[in-house]
């Protein structure tokens, strides 16, 4: 059962890499890539991945709150900042209590490097193009976070309390993904998506 | 506590837990005059808000509760305005 799950996780991660590279070609979202097996991730690595991933979405949200003129985008961004800050605080409290210090690995470094690219785009783009990029990235980001939490972090966690905490925050990431898709669909109906698609064809 | 017209029994208190981004139970039927308490067990804030007329808890902080006396009969679909894919229904008879 565990072997099967881990094999599926590896396949899923490989599929994600392909999907993300396609997205990158159309400049829809930044590339997210996790190239790691849950066998090789330590609790210290998980701490670093959670910290980097959460910190990035807080940073994206703060940029969106300051730049976007779209009320729906700003409200979504504010929610991401509030919720991910709560998760970060809870994670710090837990990791301090169980004595786990974040230790960077390939995955956390990869996430951070991608985050730099995303922030560059967010700082560069304006108006509807900014909104479109932000919400598309939020969908891609949360798809990855949900998949990584399910298939890499939870199976890989050794400490029982860390594992149960990851299980308990998974619904939060799933709700964020649903919400992001809802905003993305709504934004498409308002015309932003159509403009973006036209721009991508040329 | 307000008691609904024609009611014979004492008003009851009901609790809806907000846990793992769900209202538990997702459907609840109460009698007019009953009290409903939403208890937020998540680590992030939520609301219990009807789209039209009804009720609005506003912010229910992590670990906090909100109390509502159900004085008007009806079927109330409500959401968390912060996480609008969270949905539930309160029926007041």
Image: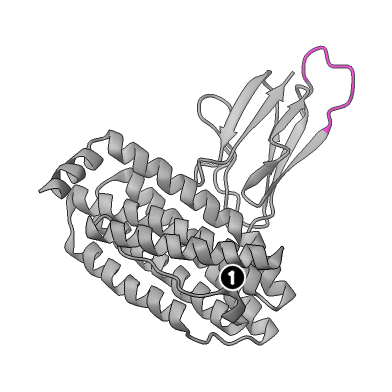
Which residue appears farthest toward the right when viewing the image? B9
The relative height of residue B64 versus residue A198 in the rendered view (above or below) is below
The relative height of residue B68 versus residue A104 in the rendered view (above or below) is above
Which residue appears farthest toward the top when viewing the image? B6
Left or right of residue B14: residue A182: left
- Residue A61 visible (yes or no): no
Left or right of residue A182: residue A168: right
What residue does disc 1 label? Answer: A153
The relative height of residue B92 versus residue A163 in the rendered view (above or below) is above
Q: Does the segment drawn in magenta span residue A86?
A: no
Left or right of residue A96: residue A80: left
Mark 1, secondary structure of its residue: helix
Which percent across, then down, holds residue A69? 24, 48
In front of the other: B42 or A124: A124
Instruction: Give the image quarter of residue A100.
Output: bottom right
Residue drawn where x is 26% and y is 55% of the image? A28
Which percent across, then down, holds residue A127? 18, 50
Which percent across, then down, holds residue B47? 57, 44
Q: Specify the quadrant that holds the N terminus of chain B.
A: top right
Query: Which portion, as a residue range, is magenta?
Result: B4-12
Residue drawn where x is 51% and y is 80% of the image? A48
Residue drawn where x is 34% and y is 64% of the image? A60
Q: Specify the quadrant that holds the C terminus of chain B.
A: top right
Q: How many marks?
A: 1
Instruction: Give the image quarter of residue B30.
Output: top right
Residue drawn where x is 69% and y is 83% of the image? A98
Chain containing mark 1: A
Left or right of residue A82: residue B5: right
Magenta span dominant secondary structure: loop
């Amino acid at each position: 059962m565990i072997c099967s799950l881990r094999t599926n996780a590896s396949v899923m991660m490989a599929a994600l890499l392909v999907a993300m590279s396609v997205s990158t070609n159309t400049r829809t979202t930044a590339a997210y890539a996790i190239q790691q097996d849950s066998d090789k991730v330590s609790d210290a690595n998980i701490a670093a991945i959670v910290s980097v991933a959460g910190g990035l979405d807080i940073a994206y949200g703060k940029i969106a709150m300051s730049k976007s003129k779209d009320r729906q985008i700003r409200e979504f961004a504010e929610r991401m900042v509030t919720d991910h800050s709560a998760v970060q605080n809870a994670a710090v409290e837990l990791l301090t209590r169980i004595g786990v210090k974040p230790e960077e690995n390939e995955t956390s470094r990869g996430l951070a490097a991608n985050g730099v690219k995303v922030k560059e785009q967010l700082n560069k783009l304006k108006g509807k193009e900014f909104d479109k990029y932000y919400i598309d990235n939020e969908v891609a980001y949360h798809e990855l976070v949900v998949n990584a939490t399910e298939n890499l972090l939870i199976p890989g966690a050794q400490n029982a309390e860390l594992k149960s905490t990851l299980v308990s925050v998974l619904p939060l990431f799933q709700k964020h993904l649903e919400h992001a898709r809802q905003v993305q669909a709504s934004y498409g109906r308002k015309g932003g998506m159509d403009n973006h698609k036209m721009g991508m064809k040329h | 506590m307000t008691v609904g017209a024609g009611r014979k029994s004492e008003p009851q208190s009901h609790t809806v837990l907000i846990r793992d981004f769900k209202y538990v139970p997702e459907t609840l039927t109460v009698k007019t005059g009953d009290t409903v308490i939403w208890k937020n067990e998540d680590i992030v804030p939520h609301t219990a808000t009807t789209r039209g007329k009804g009720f609005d808890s506003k912010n229910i902080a992590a670990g906090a509760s909100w109390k509502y006396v159900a004085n008007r009969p009806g079927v109330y679909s409500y959401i968390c305005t912060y996480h609008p894919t969270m949905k539930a229904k309160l029926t007041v008879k």
